[in-house]
Image: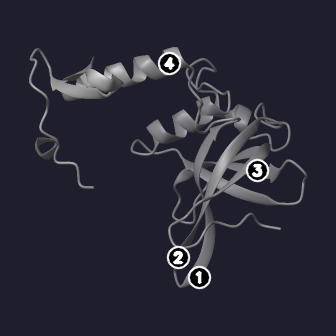
Amino acid sequence: MILEGGTGGKLNNYDVLVKGTKVGESAGGTPCIEIEFVTLDGSGTIMAWKYLTEKAWPYTEENLKDLGWDAAERGYNFEELNTDDQSPLAGVACRIAVEQEEYQGKTKHRVKFINRAGSGRATLDDTQVSGTLDAFRKKIGVTKRAVAGGVKVAYAAGTEKPVNESDLNIPF
């Protein structure tokens, strides 16, 4: 069974293993690395094509690194990836996001994102939350101060004047 993409612009996420890789070419002659993924239970597969062009290389390189293969560290020896199920990536766990797209009048399912295994939203502890929010407040130029009743109010950086909420241009 081919893994299916979500409809209406939504993505379906799958935890998968790399089954194998090959070096190939698109119908138009563009070189690419073909990566075949299989679901953890073996019930579904899908192929991804990561193109070897100057424009696509930063994305292809990032995906390969996420799968544990660093081109620079491997001496750009792409031939290692032309080994199907003997690929150094075979068996690597990851998460993919699959989308549905129309191409030449046909519905196709395409791997849109390749991410490290276990990727996704993280739960932060109190220290991490505080640091994240402090960095955000600094970026937007406000500080947090305590006020009567324990309510927190944002102040413009370096002032004691509360920020007027209408000045923040919040669309909701």
Q: Position of residue 142 (x, y in %)?
A: 20, 24
Q: Amino acid at mark 3?
A: Phe
Give the residue at mark 2: 103
Give the residue at mark 4: 128
Give the residue at mark 1: 106
- Binning the other alpha carbons within 10 Å of mark 1 as few (below 14), some (14 to 19) or many (20 upward) gives few
Question: Which quarter of the image is occupied by the C terminus?
Answer: bottom left
- Of badges 4 and 1, nearer the viewer stands 4
Separation of marks 3 and 1 at Cα, in angstroms = 22 Å
Farthest residue, direction front: 149
Between disc 3 and disc 1, whose residue precedes? 3
- Binning the other alpha carbons within 10 Å of mark 4 as few (below 14), some (14 to 19) or many (20 upward) gives few
Horizontal arrangement in the rendering, residue 95 relative to residue 159 (left or right): right
Q: Residue at x 35, y 23 (%)?
A: 150
Between disc 4 and disc 2, whose residue precedes? 2
Q: Amino acid at mark 1?
A: Lys
Between disc 4 and disc 3, whose residue precedes? 3
- Of badges 4 and 3, nearer the viewer stands 4
Q: Amino acid at mark 4?
A: Gln
Q: Which numbered marker is on residue 37? A: 3
Marks 1 and 2 close (CB-CB < 8 Å): yes
